[in-house]
Amino acid sequence: MYNSGRLVENPNLANFITSEEYKIFDFSFFTVVPKSLFLKPLYTIIFFTVFLLMIFIVISYFVSRYITNRITVSLRKLSENMKKFEKKEFKNINVDGFEDEIKTFLKVYNDVANELERYVENTELIIKNKTREIEIKNEKLRELSIKDELTGLYNRRFFNESFPKDCSLAFREKMYVNFAIIDLDDFKVINDTYGHQAGDECLRVFSKMFKESFHRESDKYFRYGGEEFVVYYISKEKTNFFEKLEKFRKEVERHILEYNGEKITFTISIGVVEEKQETSRYQDIISKADKNLYIAKNKGKNIVV
């Protein structure tokens, strides 16, 4: 209320809002509005603002979850595929259904995976070819190390590897060992008479006849040293090994080698062992055959003992 030109505070106006005072002449004017009339629209605005904000937060939450899940699935697939790199598996990821940004990234990933796959395939092919080349060279070196260069027969080195193993097998299985040492008679005379090249030709011709006569898979033949040769095989039953050696001796005796206009003949002496292997000592077989060869030489040569 107004008193003597001043606005007097009235406790009853606590629930009202008053405007500024305006004076016209001796009168003062001001507006009095109930607070409820003013605040009600404001409360309504605040309520709707908070409501819309809550809706926005909820929508934002679900949208972010959706986007996060999409990205997470993409990254999980990418991670799973990258783990396969250690196993040299470079599988492409189907980019359909992904967002453009992720799709672009996955396309780059697929390009890299394809390039890696081509690189690995080329590298593996190179390694495979190189490995095969090394294996072939090793096989050739192995052949050179176990074969006699002049005759093409297996050498003594390979005999020393093979014979002990076969004797052990024969001993375990109670099998027969059929073993023979063959020596060309008077080979030094051939070298002295016709020359060493003629002697080498005799060894080559004999080796060819040797392989043709003992050509079964079980037959194993070697150039034992110089003009000495070995043939053996193991069998479950006693065989006609002696008779086969006698037939071979006669074939060699009948053969005539023509060399530089000369007709050369030669004979062989053979020491044979045919017995069931009763011991693991393979040296005993060699010693017995060697003794029989010595007997054949002393009996005039060109015989089988």
Image: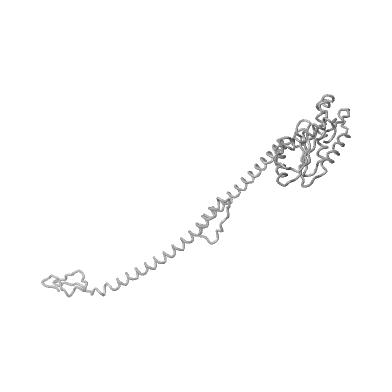
Residue 10 found in image quarter: bottom left
Q: Give the quarter of the figure containing the N terminus.
A: bottom left
Residue 91 x, y percent position in the rendering: 58, 55
139, 189: nearer the viewer: 189
Furthest residue toward left: 4
Q: Residue furthest front?
A: 278
Horizontal side, residue 75 vs residue 185: left or right: left
Quick check: 160 above or below 66? above
**Percent from the top left, x then y, of residue 267?**
85, 32
Residue in the picture at 55% in, 60% down:
96
* Color style of the picture: one colour
Query: Can you see residue 135?
Result: yes
Q: Quadrant of residue 152?
A: top right
Where residue 42 appears, as percent x and y from the top left, is 29, 71
Quadrant of the drawing holding the C terminus = top right
What is the number of callouts on the image? Answer: 0
Residue nearest the observer in this picture, 52 or 149: 149
Residue 147 position within the rendered picture, expressed as x and y whole percent measured from the top left? 74, 36
- Camera-side residue of 273 and 45: 273
The answer to whether one can see residue 101 in this image is no
Q: Residue at x 30, y 71 (%)?
A: 43
Q: Identify whether 304 is placed above or below 218.
A: above
Of all residues shown, which one is farthest toward the top?
192
Quadrant in the rendering for residue 293: top right
Q: Please state which of residues 141 and 115 is positioned toward the viewer in this rendering.
A: 141
Would residue 6 appear left or right of 284 to someone viewing this image?
left
Please give the name of the residue rendered at 85% of the width and 38% of the height, measured from the top-left corner: 246
Give the vertical position of 163 relative to 1 (above or below).
above
